[in-house]
Image (spheres, rainbow, N blue to C red):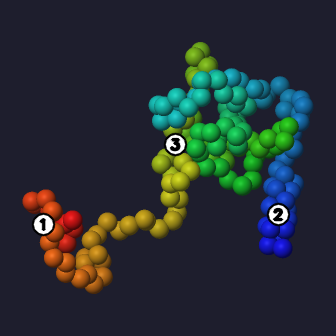
């Protein structure tokens, strides 16, 4: 019963995402948007040698598929900019707030991403992981521990081994 409920919830979620997204197919883009194959670098590291990127010549915006964002380990919002051929596409500048530069001569896309843009990294709006202070300085009570004979010389108490 729980399995059926979870499958039903997943199907409803997928249907909702597809219904909220703009479905664009065929040549609905007009002349200003085209697919460009390029080399992609994120923070100076090559992540794709030949990636397909939708480019809007009118406002220089770039769109990448959810599949490619997942391969590059970049987070993306639940609602895409548009759906084309069943694939979700997100604007690098508009949806992901990434800084980009495209070199047309080299067919090279450079993306500058904050640490929080990557999957597995804390969000920029969330609380810090640690305040950086030892427990005693944060007001927590600590028990005194005997110093281990294996602790290296110069290792401060209570952080010894």
- Tell me if mark 2 has few (under 14), some (14-19) or many (20+) residues whose alpha carbon lies within 10 angstroms of its own: few
Q: Position of residue 4 (x, y in %)?
A: 84, 68
Quadrant housing the N terminus = bottom right
**Residue placed furthest toward the left:** 153
Count neighbours of disc 3 (C-alpha within 10 A) and say few if under 14, some if 14 to 19, many if 20 or more. Answer: some
Q: Give me the residue at 21% from left, 65% from top.
A: 161
Query: Which of the labelled discs sits on residue 7, or is there none?
Result: 2
Q: Report crowding for label 1: few under 14, some 14 to 19, many 20 or more residues within 10 A (C-alpha).
A: few
Q: Distance between the residues labelled 3 and 2?
A: 34 Å
For disc 1, the marked residue is 149
Camera-near label (3 vs 2) is 2
Q: In this view, does 145 lie to the left or right of 107?
A: left
Q: Circle 1 sits in a helix, a strand or a loop, which is it?
A: loop
Nearer the observer: mark 2 or 1; the answer is: 1
Question: What is the number of the mark on residue 113?
Answer: 3
Q: Where is residue 22 in the image (x, y as percent from the top left)?
A: 84, 47
Image marks 2 and 1: residues in contact by CB distance under 8 Å: no
Q: Which residue is nearer to you in this view: 15 or 160?
A: 160
Q: Is mark 3 on a helix, strand or loop?
A: loop
The answer to whether residue 124 is seen in the rendering is no
């Amino acid at each position: 019963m729980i399995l059926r409920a979870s499958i039903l919830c997943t199907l409803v979620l997928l249907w909702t995402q597809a219904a909220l997204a703009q479905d664009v197919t065929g040549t609905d883009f007009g002349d200003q948007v085209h697919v460009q194959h390029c080399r992609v670098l994120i923070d100076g590291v090559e992540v794709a040698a030949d990636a397909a990127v939708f480019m809007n010549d009118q406002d220089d915006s770039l769109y990448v598929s959810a599949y490619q964002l997942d391969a590059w380990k970049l987070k993306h919002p639940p609602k895409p900019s548009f759906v084309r051929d069943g694939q979700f596409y997100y604007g690098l500048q508009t949806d992901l707030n990434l800084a980009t530069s495209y070199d047309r001569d080299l067919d090279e896309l450079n993306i500058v991403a904050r640490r929080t843009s990557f999957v597995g990294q804390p969000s920029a709006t969330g609380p810090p992981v640690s305040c950086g202070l030892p427990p005693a300085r944060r007001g927590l009570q600590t028990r005194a521990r005997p110093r281990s004979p294996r602790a290296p010389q110069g290792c401060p108490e209570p952080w010894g081994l």
